C-alpha cells in the first residue's frame, strides 16, 4: 500500500488560487491511479479530479477549466492547481491512490474560500 500526505491548503479569497500537493511513499507510485476528492461540511465526499498512470486526466464538471491535476513520478507527488476559487470550493481535500483492489487515503487538507 501507499501512504499519502497532503499539504498546501489554507484560506484564500474568492478568485484566488491555491496549489495542493500529495506526497506518496511506500510503494510503486507510478502504477497508481491518483485522484483528489473533497468533502464540505454536512455533505458527502465527492470526486474532484483524476490522473491515470499515463497522465490522462479527468475532472468533475464543477471544477473543469479551473483546476489542474498533475503528477511527478520522479518525486512521488500529485498536485492540484486550483484557480478562480469560489466559496463553494470550501472543503477538506483528500488525496486517493488506487491500484486494483487497493486504495489509500491521505488525512486531508482544509481549503477555505472567503467571499
Image (cartoon, grey):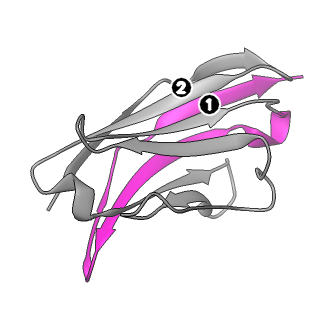
Q: Is residue 111 magenta?
A: yes
Q: Residue 30 location in percent, x, y?
A: 25, 56
Nearer to me, 107 or 64: 64
Nearer to me, 108 or 2: 2
Nearer to me, 101 or 32: 32
Query: Image point 55% across, 46% down: which residue?
Result: 69
On-image quarter of the N terminus = bottom left
Query: Image point 22% across, 53% down: which residue?
Result: 29
Q: Is residue 83 magenta?
A: no
The majority secondary structure of the magenta stretch comes to strand
Q: Residue 92 location in percent, x, y?
A: 56, 41
Locate residue 8 relative to residue 53 in the image: left or right.
right
Spatial CA distance of label 2 from label 1 is 5 Å
On-image quarter of the C terminus = top right
Residue 2 image label = none
- Which residues, given as a range, are shown in magenta? 86-115
Q: Up-down: is 111 above or below 58? A: above
Q: Up-down: is 53 above or below 15? A: below
| Farthest-out residue, right | 115
Q: Which residue is mark 2?
A: 9
Query: Image point 25% across, 41% down: which residue?
Result: 76
Locate residue 42 relative to residue 7 in the image: left or right.
right
Disc 2 + disc 1, Cβ < 8 Å: yes
Q: Up-down: is 36 above or below 109? A: below
Other-residue count near label 1 (Cα within 10 Å), few / some / many at <14 / 14–19 / ≥20: many
Residue 111 image label = 1
Q: Up-down: is 111 above or below 51? A: above
Locate residue 95 relative to residue 115 in the image: left or right.
left
Q: Residue 75 location in percent, x, y?
A: 24, 34
Secondary structure at badge 1 equals strand
Query: Image point 77% across, 53% down: which residue?
Result: 64
Secondary structure at badge 2 equals loop
Amino acid at each position: 500500500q501507499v501512504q499519502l500526505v497532503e499539504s498546501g491548503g489554507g484560506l484564500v479569497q474568492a478568485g484566488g488560487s491555491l496549489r495542493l500537493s500529495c506526497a506518496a511513499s511506500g510503494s510503486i507510485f507510478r502504477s497508481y491511479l491518483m485522484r483528489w476528492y473533497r468533502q464540505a461540511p454536512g455533505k458527502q465526499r465527492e470526486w474532484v479530479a483524476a490522473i491515470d498512470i499515463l497522465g490522462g486526466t479527468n475532472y468533475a464538471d464543477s471544477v473543469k477549466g479551473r483546476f489542474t491535476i498533475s503528477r511527478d513520478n520522479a518525486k512521488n507527488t500529485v498536485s492540484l492547481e486550483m484557480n478562480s476559487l469560489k466559496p463553494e470550493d470550501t472543503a477538506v481535500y483528500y488525496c486517493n491512490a488506487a491500484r486494483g483492489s487497493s486504495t489509500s487515503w491521505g488525512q486531508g487538507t482544509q481549503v477555505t474560500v472567503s467571499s
